[in-house]
Amino acid sequence: MRIAIAYLSVVLLWATTPLAIKWSGEGPGFLFGVTGRMVIGVVCIGIVLLLKKQRLSWQRKARQTYLAVALQVYGSMIVVYWAAQFIPSGWISVLFGLTPMITALLARLWLGLRELNFSKLLSYLLGVGGLTLMFGSALTLGRDAVLGIAAVIFGAFLHSFSALWIKRIDAGLPALNQVAGGLLFALPAYLLTWGVFDGEWPRHFTPASVISIVYLGVIATTGGFVLYYYLLIRLAATRVALITLISPVLALLLGHAVNDEPITPNVLAGAASIFSALLLHEVAGKRRSRARAEARAAASESPNGGNRPALKRPSRYR
């Protein structure tokens, strides 16, 4: 039940986060928006750690995990914030919907190559087709929109790489500790980036930007990241990535209803192609897992346990 509630919460948070990201940079700028979010997040996470009387581990595997989390918190997030200046917020969620496929491809390359069947290949082709349609829509918005799409895809790659890296390290750290350590590693990079490329206190804030920064820092960072890594500890990385199959639909509708973001036929076709690719990818994965489970069950039920010859047991075991 806890996992189901956490899963639903992350879906809702990921559906609202793209619009909040876009609003947070309108006025103060995207660098201040993301840096302010992380400062608030570190303060909130620190308060939670103090209340729970938890200390961060600084052993080798723990440090490696914090670095892996920081790759997602800094590398993935900052390129998405930059891209949000040029593309509708709903597009960010749709493009991040490719995360399960990117995660699966990286898992094959990093954690062991597996056979690529026809269904999986077709799902990848559908995903590429959806991307092509999205890029075509971006061309009507200008060169910056095309670069924005490329940046979001790169952010999704870093996000997937970070998740698999955490799984590979397998430090066994609580989700709260993972987020706290990752934020501590990422925050100096954010402050340095803001100082070098901006460094001035914003002269103009909008009510939406202030509310968005606070929401992202307190709710999305503190609650969202903790719930995400809570799920990542208890579920396979590819299952966690399937959140991106649900949240894009909500994000597109929210951006259209609240921020007047257009939903053109090309955008709908591209999103539908990507969603179809993800569904096909998931169905193919479940069929393969079911077939393997049935094969293992059949082998265990056979008299000789598969291909091994039956061993005559001593009478005391009978």
Image (cartoon, helix red, strand yellow):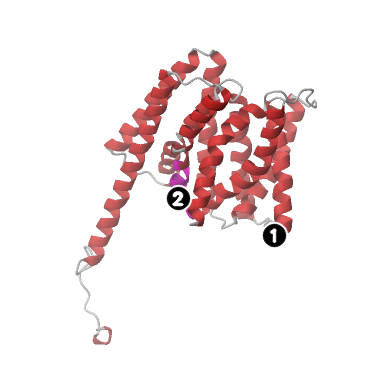
Above/below status of 259 relative to 249: above
Q: Nearer the viewer, residue 42 or 122?
A: 42
Find numbered disc 2 in the image and state the secondary structure of the residue it sits on.
loop
The amino acid beneath tag 1 is Lys
Q: Please tell me whether residue 44 belongs to the stretch shown in magenta.
A: no
**At 69% from the left edge and 34% from the top edge, which residue is drawn?**
211
Q: Which of 21 and 249 is in front in this view?
A: 249
The residue singled out by tag 2 in the image is: 236
Q: Magenta segment, principal secondary structure?
A: helix
Q: Please tell me whether residue 236 belongs to the stretch shown in magenta.
A: yes
Horizontal side of 222 relative to 5 (left or right) equals right
Horizontal side of 256 relative to 104 (left or right) equals right
Q: In which quarter of the image is the C terminus?
A: bottom left
Q: Which of 146 and 242 is in front in this view?
A: 242
Q: Pointers 1 and 2 in contact (CB under 8 A)?
A: no
**At 30% from the left edge and 47% from the top edge, which residue is drawn?**
288
Mark identifier at residue 52: 1
Above/below status of 20 relative to 149: below
- Which residues are drawn in magenta? 234-242
